Image: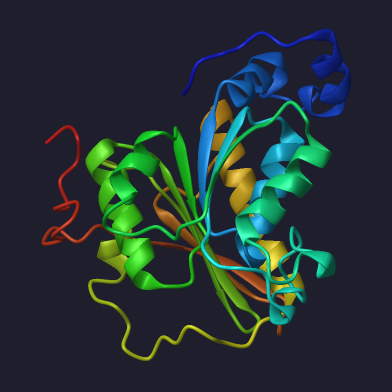
Amino acid sequence: MGKRIPLTDQERAIYEWQIWVPGFGEAGQERLKGASVLVSRVGGLGSVVAYELAAAGVGRLILAHAGNVKPSDLNRQLLMTHDWIGKPRVESAARRLRELNPRLEIEAVPENINEQNAARLVGEADVVVDCAPLFNERFAMNREAVRQGKPLVECAMYDLEAQVTTIVPGQTPCLACLYPENPPAWKRQFPVFGAVSGTIGCVGAMEAIKVIAEFGKTLAGELLVCDLREMTFRKCKIFRNRDCPVCGGRSEHQ
């Protein structure tokens, strides 16, 4: 989907094992190197998404997350460390990712996605991965992704349950098709294990990799629903709302 940037000999050595993956190859790795990905929030979900994308060789990450590290982050936000308590989360994330991949370009934004910054940040990315817990952030990203025609990997979890879908503007339902309004019962704080966030974060990262490298089958038009309490995984078809105020239910061919 994006530009291809030739690999160095060092990069071929680092990514050799994943270049062996059928359908991916060196062309896929070059697309990852040429790609920019926006990760909204680098908490329990987003920290794992960002880490896996950095490890896979994505060339540029835009990380948006406000606030400072606090003790309750440390059970799941794997890019945060105890010695960073009281300091900006996004700086801790950038620091850890650069240790993993010093070739990675990072734009660390100490803000959560909002109506004022969504257009600019989505505009800088080839793919958006939504790991935000609040629907006002998720709705803002969804509107801009649809408006700008950017693929959006939508990740969410609660307790031991999680779900992922990939939104392709003009082809699939958008977030507003699934959630026309902000769910009134949704709270900012909720029960969470880091292992649940990590599981779905890895799935979200793999979706972004497949979208960028143009291989495999994504979750476009499908919702993956996971229940780790019962250890069940299922996929269900999701459908566009023709009255959706964001995507209008209209395909790019209509």
The picture quadrant where one finds residue 57 is: top right
- Residue 242 spot, x, y in % from top left: 13, 58
Judge whether 177 appears above or below 20 on screen: below
* Residue located at (63% from left, 27% from top): 59
Q: Is residue 174 visible?
A: no
Q: Is residue 222 left or right of residue 192?
A: left
Q: Nearer the viewer, residue 27 or 11?
A: 11
The residue lying furthest to the front in this view is 86
Q: Is residue 46 left or right of residue 74?
A: left
* Residue located at (64% from left, 31% from top): 58
Q: Nearer the viewer, residue 5 or 91?
A: 91
- Residue 124 spot, x, y in % from top left: 41, 33
Judge whether 253 appears above or below 70 on screen: above
Q: Nearer the viewer, residue 225 or 14?
A: 14
Q: Is residue 1 visible?
A: yes
* Residue located at (59% from left, 53% from top): 204
The picture quadrant where one finds residue 149 is: top left
- Residue 45 spot, x, y in % from top left: 62, 63
Picture colour scheme = rainbow
* Residue located at (29% from left, 44% from top): 119
The picture quadrant where one finds residue 14 is: top right
Q: Quadrant of the C terminus?
A: top left
Judge whether 165 appears above or below 183 on screen: above
